């Protein structure tokens, strides 16, 4: 582990800041702070940011990654739910990078519908693990200016987000992420670069925005099919979609009309297949969360 001198936060400063603020990291908010400058710089390099690029960071915490993003010359808007951390971060940024272009929004990222300033083109974050997937999907949905994403998540979640159809870890997060972007798993991160040390492994996942499949169905309709298809993983699509379609025969008809074998399971299908099925669901029922 490198303790990089300079503008970034090391273990001593993380402890000192947390102590001064009376921060006792909570699991509920997924508060594990990175104290290794080498890891931060590796993440920033992997994010392939342009100098001056507007980046949104979710959960800046004590500012470890934020300072790395600012060091790379980015303009950063950060969304932090914890008012104590949100209240401190501007001072931390001022102390380390006085010229930096930075602002913080104190809010639950899941509730944020607009951001101040220029629209961000990149999302880079060490996400709070318990809400990582909803936060990621919500941001891709609400901020169509986002072209690229690089997020640190639980390693298992990184696997799921990047899984192709047919693989063991392919499921709802993989299919929904594929609506917005092409995802690939990036590098693993040691749990020892965090304070406190989490009891799960972490990894980065990179997403590159692309057009959703061309379809007459809405995103909500397609996601309703995805949710139903995976609600009971072991069932065939005919059985799994019978509720959504009104009956088994109606599900079979919709699947055949979409050119999909009703005897398959959802894990074999790509997002374009789910979109085609959604076009044939009677009444196109169902609204879902992201
Ligand atoms: N970026 C910092 C780092 O790398 O050291 C902290 C990352 S820590 C894993 C997650 C951060 O997300 C914490 O600061 C936590 O308070 C914040 N957080 C948790 N839930 C959130 C939410 N719903 N919206 C915004 N921030 C949240």
Image (cartoon, rainbow, N blue to C red):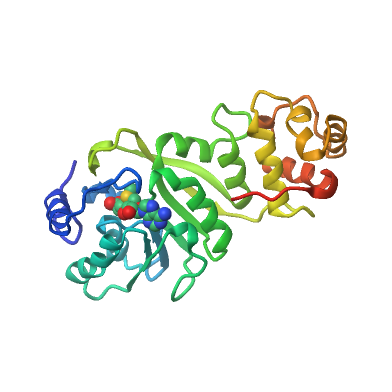
From this view, report whether residue 60 is shown above or below residue 42.
Answer: below
Task: Looking at the picture, tell me which residue is in the foreground, 177 or 185.
Answer: 177
Task: Looking at the picture, tell me which residue is in the foreground, 42 or 247.
Answer: 247
Residue at the spot 56% in from the left edge and 62% down from the top edge: 142
From this view, report whether residue 165 is shown above or below residue 39.
Answer: above
| Quarter location, residue 97 | bottom left
User: Is residue 125 something that shows in the picture?
Assistant: no
**Residue 28, percent across and down?**
35, 45
Is 207 situated left or right of 20 in this image? Answer: right
**Could you tell me how many numbered marks the image carries?**
0
**Residue 252, percent across and down?**
85, 31
Task: Looking at the picture, tell me which residue is in the foreground, 184 or 136.
Answer: 136
Is 123 situated left or right of 143 in this image? Answer: left
From this view, report whether residue 284 is shown above or below residue 229.
Answer: below
Residue at the spot 85% in from the left edge and 38% down from the top edge: 254
**Residue 288, percent across and down?**
65, 49
Residue at the spot 78% in from the left edge and 24% down from the top edge: 263
In the picture, the quarter occupied by the N terminus is: top left
Is 155 situated left or right of 189 in this image? Answer: right
**Residue 146, percent across and down?**
52, 62
| Quarter location, residue 250 | top right
User: Is residue 243 something that shows in the picture?
Assistant: yes
């Amino acid at each position: 582990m490198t303790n990089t001198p300079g503008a970034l936060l090391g273990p001593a400063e993380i402890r000192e800041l947390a102590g001064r603020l009376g921060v006792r990291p909570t699991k509920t908010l997924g508060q594990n702070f990175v104290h290794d400058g080498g890891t931060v710089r590796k993440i920033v390099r992997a994010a392939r940011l342009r100098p001056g690029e507007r980046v949104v960071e979710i959960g800046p915490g004590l500012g470890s990654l934020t300072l790395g993003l600012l060091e790379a010359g980015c303009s950063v808007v950060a969304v932090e739910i914890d008012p104590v951390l949100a209240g401190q971060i501007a001072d931390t940024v001022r102390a380390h990078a006085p010229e930096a272009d930075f602002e913080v929004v104190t809010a639950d990222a899941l509730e944020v519908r607009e951001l101040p300033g220029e629209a961000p083109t990149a999302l880079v974050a060490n996400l709070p693990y318990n809400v990582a997937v909803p936060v990621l999907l919500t941001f891709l949905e609400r901020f169509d200016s986002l072209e690229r994403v690089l997020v640190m998540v639980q390693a298992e979640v990184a696997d799921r987000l990047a899984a192709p159809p047919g693989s063991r870890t392919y499921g709802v997060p993989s299919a929904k992420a594929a609506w917005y972007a092409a995802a690939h798993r990036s590098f693993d991160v040691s749990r020892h670069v965090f304070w406190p040390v989490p009891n799960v492994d972490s990894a980065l996942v990179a997403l590159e925005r692309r057009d959703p499949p061309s379809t007459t169905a809405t995103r909500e309709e397609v996601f309703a099919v995805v949710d139903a298809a995976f609600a009971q993983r072991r069932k065939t699509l005919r059985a799994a979609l019978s509720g959504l379609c009104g009956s088994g025969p109606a599900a079979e008809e919709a699947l055949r009309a979409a050119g999909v074998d009703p005897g398959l399971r959802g894990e074999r299908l790509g997002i374009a297949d789910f979109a085609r099925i959604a076009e044939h669901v009677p009444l196109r029922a169902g609204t879902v969360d992201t």
